[in-house]
Amino acid sequence: MFESRKVSFPGAAGGNLSARLDVPASPRAFALFAHCFTCGKDIFAASRIAEGLTARGIAVLRFDFTGIGSSEGEFANTNFSSNVGDLVAAASYLRQSHAAPSLLIGHSLGGAAVLAAAPSVPEATCVVTIGAPSSAAHVTHNFAADLAEIAETGKAEVTLAGRTFTITRQFLDDIAGQHFIDGLANLRKALLVCHAPRDEYVGIDNATTIFSAARHPKSFLSLDTADHLLRKREDAIYLADVIAAWSSRYLPAAAEAAALPPGVVEVSETLTGHLAQQVRAGRHVLMAGEPVAVGGDDAGPGPYDYLLAALGACTSMTMRLYAERKGIKAERFSVRLSHRRVHAADCADCETKEGNIGEITRDIVIDGDVPEAARARLMEIADRCPVHETLTHEIKVRSRLVT
């Protein structure tokens, strides 16, 4: 079961920082995620990575830096050093409230920030950077046209991603004095550098510099055609899966979750995406959701997909057991199913004559040298699978409110 909580804690400047803590039922480790420059904790890449890690037993804290999103403070008074301070404050919050973070993850400038903050989080055993610059000063390319005004007047209003921010001279002075790259040789933590070769904001040469400066154990992950913000869902999903698998090597082993009794299924909201659900059956953990087109975020198969899967699996299993018992040499059974709503009046063999009814089409393929008579008998047996009989006979669903 997953839980997603809104939390807050004091940042480096004293103001409260808005955060979200995604926690599995029995977390084996905690991760800390730092977002990109002027982004926020709820960008898709952050939420998807959190979802992927929590599914593997790793809790994730993601927060808005001072002056960003719902966090207190003025952005104009912040800089790279204050971001690093906020990260250390977030680590302290986890240390005091749950457990110190074992995994630090940073996206873009957040990647540079976690590299700078890592020495101050001794419990962290591994660090991940995503599209990170090798120098904090790299961020100035976002407002290069305003640098002269900042130098002359001390500040300038700049537009980034459709929003206006105040950039001050102290911000520029601070990033000019950052040299976190020099400390990577003594990082003493596993490092995963993730970067897209065609990153449109932070060139791949930055990844080369970071990777070369660090010592082993270090790994590099090419994000292929992904853009800097990982806007494509498949890119974020791929990255989340790799981070979860890679970090598992350096984190405590996952505790085996207690299996549910046979015949019991538990479904609960993950709270990491709209309509996203976690499904537990026995010792198995699955995801369910709805497509983006109908308001979900495609976290997994939909409810009707699982219904069709149950019928298809039951059909194939029942046919296989019958074939084995009767010595029928069927090589393979395949079942393809679809569901739709139809007008009852258009169904000649339906008892219901008004309104709509559900109709499932089940196409069955029997591979192998099976005589026609045996094929016909197997098709009859398909209708006797327990799920088929459940769907076609009266069934009561009795709901109880559990407190």
Image (spheres, grey):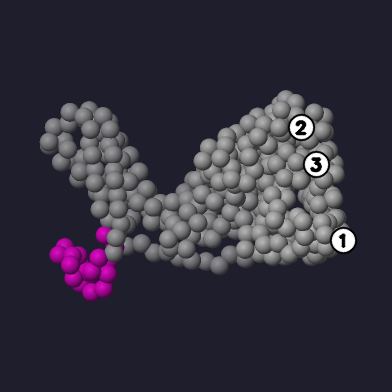
400 left or right, relative to 24: left
Q: Residue at x 84, y 49 (%)?
A: 174
208 left or right, relative to 156: left
Q: Position of residue 333 (x, y in %)?
A: 27, 37
Read off the residue under disc 3: 116
Read off the residue under disc 2: 189
Answer above or below: position of 120 versus 165. Answer: above
Read off the residue under disc 1: 14
Q: CA distance from mark 2 to mark 3?
A: 13 Å
Q: Residue at x 30, y 53 (%)?
A: 338
The furthest residue to the left = 372
Q: Earlier in the sequence, mark 2 or mark 3?
A: 3
Residue type, mark 3 in image: Ala
Identify the image quadrant of residue 293: bottom left
Residue 145 or residue 123, whichever sits in front:
145
Q: Residue at x 79, y 59 (%)?
A: 150
Residue type, mark 1 in image: Gly
Residue 93 or residue 312, whichever sits in front:
93
Q: Position of residue 112 (x, y in %)?
A: 74, 43
Secondary structure at badge 1 equals loop
Q: Position of residue 213 (x, y in %)?
A: 75, 29
Q: Is residue 35 magenta?
A: no
Secondary structure at badge 3 equals helix
Q: CA distance from mark 3 to mark 1?
A: 20 Å
Residue type, mark 2 in image: Lys
Magenta region: which residues? 342-359
Front: mark 3 or 1: 3
Q: CA distance from mark 2 to mark 1?
A: 29 Å
224 left or right, relative to 93: left
Residue 166 or residue 242, whichever sits in front:
166
Q: Earlier in the sequence, mark 3 or mark 1?
A: 1
Secondary structure at badge 2 equals loop
